Image (cartoon, rainbow, N blue to C red):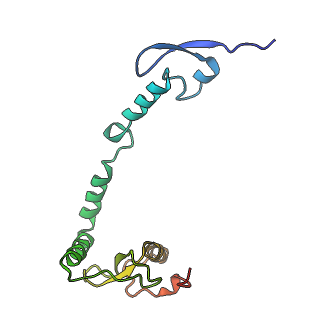
Amino acid sequence: MKETARMIIKQCEVCSKQFEIPERYARRPGRGVVCSASCAGKKASKAKGESHPLWTGGHKAMSRRYQEKNPEKKYAHEQVRYAIKTGRLAPQPCEVCCHTIVDAHHDDYREPLKVRWLCRTHHAELHRSLNERDEADFGEVPWDFVGSADR
């Protein structure tokens, strides 16, 4: 004859209702703290944003901190955005693969309108290459990091 699981009574952390749970589940961390899926959803939604223990201010705060640490980059990005908006600068196809959806890459932030047009893939690849070489002011970047342009 199969033995039935020993049940214990717990109190829901969300609605305070009492409920039964098998003892083996109650011993596991984080288990047996809510009485239903509905209360589990409410508990999860409470831990979002500022109430989450790992909250650091959100995307806007991270962006603001980045801009405060890198004012020359912020200035260069703003200049490119404004030049595109006013028609002084027009996005060109990717220098590597000719894709038309491109990012502007600055080799030197002191020259904000001197940019290279790269698709997301090749822009990310360039930054990975620069990070690997770990040089802050690399100057002109050779395209040997890309490999063949027909991928």
| Residue at 46% in and 84% down | 96
Q: Is 40 left, or right, of 28 in this rendering?
A: left
Q: Is residue 59 above or below residue 132?
A: above
- Out of 18 and 84, give the one closest to the viewer: 84
Q: Is 50 left, or right, of 6 in this rendering?
A: left
| Residue at 49% in and 23% down | 36
Picture quadrant of residue 28: top right
| Residue at 31% in and 55% down | 62
Q: Residue 61 at x, y = what percent?
A: 27, 53
Q: Residue 64 at x, y = what percent?
A: 25, 58
Picture quadrant of residue 151: bottom right
The furthest residue to the left: 86
The furthest residue to the front: 100
Which quadrant does the N terminus fall into?
top right
Q: Is residue 8 above or below residue 107?
A: above
The furthest residue to the right: 1
| Residue at 31% in and 40% down | 50
Q: Residue 126 at x, y = what percent?
A: 45, 77
- Out of 141 and 38, give the one closest to the viewer: 38
Q: Is residue 76 above or below residue 144?
A: above
Total marks placed: 0
- Out of 80 and 137, give the one closest to the viewer: 80
Picture quadrant of residue 93: bottom left
Q: Residue 9 at x, y = what percent?
A: 54, 12
Q: Is residue 45 above or below residue 132?
A: above
Q: Is 20 left, or right, of 126 in this rendering?
A: right
